[in-house]
Amino acid sequence: MSGRTWRRALVTGGAGFVGSHLCARLLDAGTGVVCLDNLATGSHANVAELEQHRGFRFVRADATDADAVRGLPGRFDLVLHLACPASPADYLRLPLETLGAGSDGTRNALERARADGARFLLASTSEVYGDPLEHPQREDYWGNVNPVGPRSVYDESKRFAEALVTAHRKVHRTDAAIVRIFNTYGPRMRTGDGRAVPTFIAQALDGMPLTVAGDGSQTRSLCYVDDTVDGILALAASGEDGPVNIGGTDEITMLELARRIVDLTGSASRIRFVDRPADDPCRRRPDTRLARERLGWQPRVPWSQGLERTIGWFTRAVAA
């Protein structure tokens, strides 16, 4: 977090997977943290230990509730807006809530940052590129998104949020930045959220077949959560507006990912192919040149280490 330090931060969606890691990292750096989360997809268990820290406060509220966001006591000098269902299983189950988080939720968080004179950061996503026709994806690529497809509630929510941040910056000169987060994995993911890494690990630990969509040739570039948090905070601490891609650079097929997880868990599980979801991206890998050159950021946790840590966490969680 070179370049800036913060006295007090608001993290919307702070009880979620990435949000809870951000809260912990900020506390470790001496920043007081207010975590606002409606627990629609987050879990209080993710931040329960943080409540022992005198600088941490959990508020159960929805970011789309303007009065709740406006009424938080004190002043913030950093606002991180992560509140939004982020996995296909969640945003397909909560389509209107997802759209609300990107629209009203973003607006409320921006207004709070503006009122407090705080630095604002929007957690956007690689989904703004849709099923990309360019590879790897650079920040100046406009994307290939189906506006009425099943994934549109998430894709368009984040695209609108980016437009809102850009307009707010132009009209009100809000100190705001946009980070586009690519597929992130690590401890505290939920086994039932529909994403590949937790699904494959849970299936392997249970000795069940690993359900690979389609023929498994579609690719992702996964990034361990510690590296993602480093990138988010590096952008927040910089003077950059973004958008800036933060994600892994090692592209892997879903079939190869499943096989690696079977090997690392020592499981006897087999691979079972299932129907591929509509509009599922064929290839995804970020161009991270901007992050390297302007933030000095690049992922550091290697595949083997990150997956071993994640599998260890899931193993302990199952045994608890």
Image: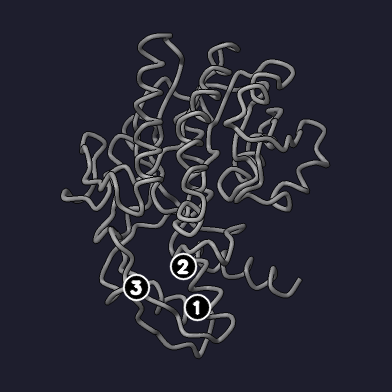
Q: CA distance from mark 1 to mark 2?
A: 8 Å
According to the image, label 3 marks what residue? 213
In the image, residue 110 lies at what x, y percent? 51, 21
Residue depicted at x 71% and y 22%:
72
Q: What's under tag 1, amino acid-wise? A: Leu
Q: CA distance from mark 1 to mark 3?
A: 21 Å
Q: Quadrant of residue 128?
A: top left
**Left or right for 25, reference 108:** right
Residue depicted at x 58% and y 80%:
205
Query: Which numbered dot is residue 215?
Result: none
Question: In the rendered structure, are the residues bearing label 1 and label 2 in contact, judged by CB atoms less than 8 Å apart?
Answer: yes
Q: Residues within 10 Å of mark 2 (few under 14, many from 20)?
A: few
Hey, which residue is sitting farthest top in the picture?
172
Q: Judging from the image, what secondary structure is the residue with disc 2 in?
A: helix
According to the image, label 1 marks what residue? 264
Hey, which residue is sitting farthest left in the picture?
133
Query: Which numbered dot is residue 304?
Result: 2
Q: Residues within 10 Å of mark 1 (few under 14, many from 20)?
A: some
Q: What's under tag 3, amino acid-wise? A: Ala
Q: Is residue 156 above or below residue 171?
A: below
Indicate which label's residue lies in the foreground, 1 or 3: 3
Question: In the rendered structure, are the residues bearing label 1 and label 3 in contact, judged by CB atoms less than 8 Å apart?
Answer: no
- Residue nearest the observer in this picture, 208 or 320: 208
In the image, residue 282 lies at what x, y percent? 24, 61
Residue 102 in view (yes/no):
yes
Q: Judging from the image, what secondary structure is the residue with disc 1 in?
A: helix
Q: Is residue 56 above or below residue 185?
A: above
User: What is the quadrant of the N terminus in the image?
Assistant: top right
**Mark found first going from the N terminus, 1 or 2:** 1
In the image, residue 107 lies at what x, y percent? 49, 23
Q: Judging from the image, what secondary structure is the residue with disc 3 in?
A: strand
